[in-house]
Amino acid sequence: MSFMDLVNRRESCRAFSDKPVEREKLIQIAEAGRLTPSGCNAQPWKFIVCDEPEAKAAVCDGVVVDGGKTGAPWRESVPAFIVMVELPAPVKPVIAEYYGDTQRFAQGDIGMAALNMCYEAMDLGLGTCIIGMSDQKKMEEGLGIPEGYECRGVIAIGYPAEVKEPRAKVRKAFDEAVSFNKF
């Protein structure tokens, strides 16, 4: 499948089969994240692959926020998760001096890694959904994340319950989203 085929076909999956995801595939997906480029090659991430019942239960508990009003209601059916944790980003001194914030690029870097992992999963026949909200304290406690390290997102991974034909993407028109040489 070409890259543009992946881009056009990828969509969030929220209904997973009960088939477990092979550890080899999870390793390949995490490797796609690990190899993602990052600002100053800081690699400000730690990916926690959760495919065992206790770790998955901790993630399921951690993605419920706002007293249970928000969360992924389908989370219990997910065969595996990758939790993306932001680490301190060592950047070049000139960057830190100019911006005054060594974490300036970290969230974007983690976003790129998330997308790389989603595309790799799709190429392996798996579905994914990025979950952006979580209860930081529950994630720290459930997964042993040290205090001060932020959980920046969770990727749900599994075999889709059913394979559907891709839907047409609803996006802004090209000329609304893209311009050349000026705004």
Image (tube, grey):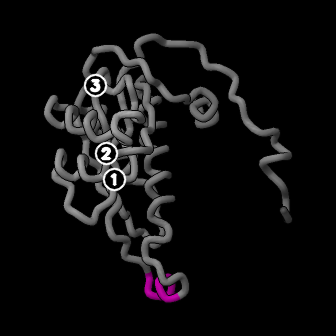
Number of labels in the image equals 3
Residue 47 lies, with reference to residue 93, above or below; the image says above
Near mark 3 (Cα within 10 A), the count class, few <14, some 14-19 or many ≥20, is many
Query: In the image, is 35 to the left or to the right of 178?
Result: left
The numbered mark, 2 or 1, whose residue comes first in the sequence reads: 2
Q: Quadrant of residue 28?
A: top left
Per the image, is 96 magenta?
A: yes
Where, quadrant-wise, is the N terminus in this rendering?
A: top right
Q: Residue at x 49, y 67 (%)?
A: 105
- In which quadrant of the rendered view does residue 90 lie? bottom left
C-alpha distance separating marks 2 and 3: 13 Å
Q: Earlier in the sequence, mark 1 or mark 3?
A: 3
Question: Mark 1 packing: few (<14 Cα in 10 Å), some, or many (20+)?
Answer: many
Rounded to the nearest angstrom, the CA distance separating label 1 from label 3 is 20 Å
Residue depicted at 62% across the width and 29% down the height: 5
Is 114 above or below relative to 118? below
Q: Which amino acid is tagged 3?
A: Pro
Q: Which residues are magenta?
A: 92-97
Q: Tell me the residue that label 3 is attached to.
A: 79
Q: Position of residue 9 (x, y in %)?
A: 59, 26
Front-most of residues 57 and 65: 65
Whether pointer 2 and pointer 1 mark residues with C-beta atoms closer than 8 Å, the reply is yes
User: Compared to 60, does 164 lie above or below?
Assistant: above
Q: Are marks 2 and 3 in contact (CB under 8 Å)?
A: no
Residue annotated with mark 1? 151
Residue name at image x 49 percent, y 12 percent: 163
